Image (cartoon, helix red, strand yellow):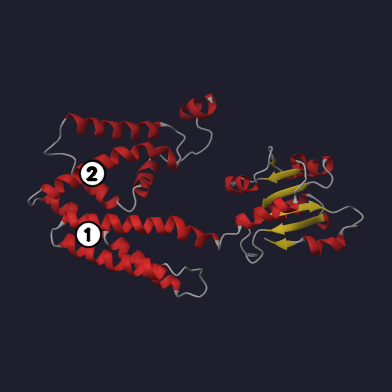
Amino acid sequence: MWRENVLRFVRPFDHIEPPYAYVKHTLVFFLPWTLILIAALWHMHGKGYNQQYRWVIISAVTIFLFFTLSGSRRSYYILPLVPALALITGRALSQWFGSNGSIRKNVMQAAAVITGIIPVVGGAVMTYAYFQGDMPGHFSQLIVGPVVFAGGIAAIALLWKGKPRHGMGLLLLLIWCAEIWVFTVGMAIAEEKRTLRPFCAAVVKELRGVDDSNIAFFKVSNSSLVFYLNRPGHLKNLASVDDAGIFFKNRPGGFIITDGIFMEELKKGLEPERVRIMLVEDKERKGDLENNFVLLTLKDRDGSDDDEEDEGEDTA
């Protein structure tokens, strides 16, 4: 706890990003309302700058500076800043709805109109993707896509005509519906193209009954892989080929899971003719070994399981 939550601030050991990292991460986290946020930040001064609003601004600045001053920076660390920025944006929208013409009003209107392009493009892409035979799809794309596309055009028209309440209300509804679709049906469609979870399921089946001490990673840094394997104990992560050799010497019949990009290194350090690849995450990506995980073991020196190699090697 001391190392992860205190020492990390003054003496970072990982998650090291440049000092401007949180500018980028904040803008990404606020999508698709980023342009409206930028307009709201420019809108901060002026009428209504009271004590409560000053407290929100001070809170936002303090949070941003605190995490920026820490040498250990990672995108989601800055999430506590989002509520304060939402309050600042909401205040700017409220003032925009009640204003009667000003430069600041025009800036908010321009930001909202450009934001309205997002559902128009998203709806068009969603509909187009359905008719691409090489991509998985769902019939709901033919409903959600055109509705979001047409609704986006209507929202832009309302905003352009100076009806911010109606335009922003429709834009909010469209993006809310689109996000619900993305995180339900869209995610299910995306899963059809993912190979990591099927690979992990195949590994779990292959290694059922194998003790954790007989399984190791080799230079693995993918937390999703560890999560999907869901092993009951801790799997050692080998840092070098020498460590891999020692592991197989102490654990005959052991198994190593590694990124395919390290296969040549492992084969050279071990005995190439004995390395047996049991499972490959995505065998079709032979030219892209990175993030293409493999499960391997060593054959007996007498080659007694040569006949089993073709049966054991598989694509998850």
Q: Nearer the viewer, residue 163 or 107?
A: 163
Residue at the disc numbered 2: 90
Tell me if 57 is positioned left or right of 190 in this view: left
Please state, as top left, top right, bottom left or bottom right, where the N terminus lies in the image. Answer: top right
Q: Residue furthest left?
A: 100
Tell me if 204 is positioned left or right of 8 in this view: right
Residue 93: percent from the left, percent from the top? 19, 47
Is residue 261 among what the camera can see?
no
Q: Dot 1: within a 10 Å radius of its alpha carbon, few (fewer than 14), some, or many (20 or more) residues?
A: many
At x 39% / y 38%, what residue is drawn?
78
- Placement of 10 over or under 127, stated as above or below: above
Q: CA distance from mark 1 to mark 2?
A: 17 Å
Q: Amino acid at mark 1?
A: Val
Tell me if 156 is positioned left or right of 252 in this view: left
At x 34% / y 40%, what residue is drawn?
82
At x 32% / y 62%, what residue is drawn?
119
Q: Residue furthest right?
A: 302
Q: Nearer the viewer, residue 16 or 236?
A: 236
Residue 306: percent from the left, percent from the top? 86, 61
Label 1: state its secondary structure.
Answer: helix
Q: Amino acid at mark 2?
A: Gly
Dividing the picture into quarters, in which one does residue 278 lie? bottom right
Tell me if 282 is positioned left or right of 109 in this view: right
Labels 1 and 2: the sequence-earlier one: 2
Q: Foreground mark, 1 or 2? A: 2
- Which numbered tag is attached to residue 113? 1
Q: Nearer the viewer, residue 112 or 220?
A: 112
Residue 259: percent from the left, percent from the top? 65, 52
Is residue 300 among what the camera can see?
yes
* Residues at marks 1 and 2 touching, judged by CB atoms closer than 8 Å: no
Label 2: state its secondary structure.
Answer: helix
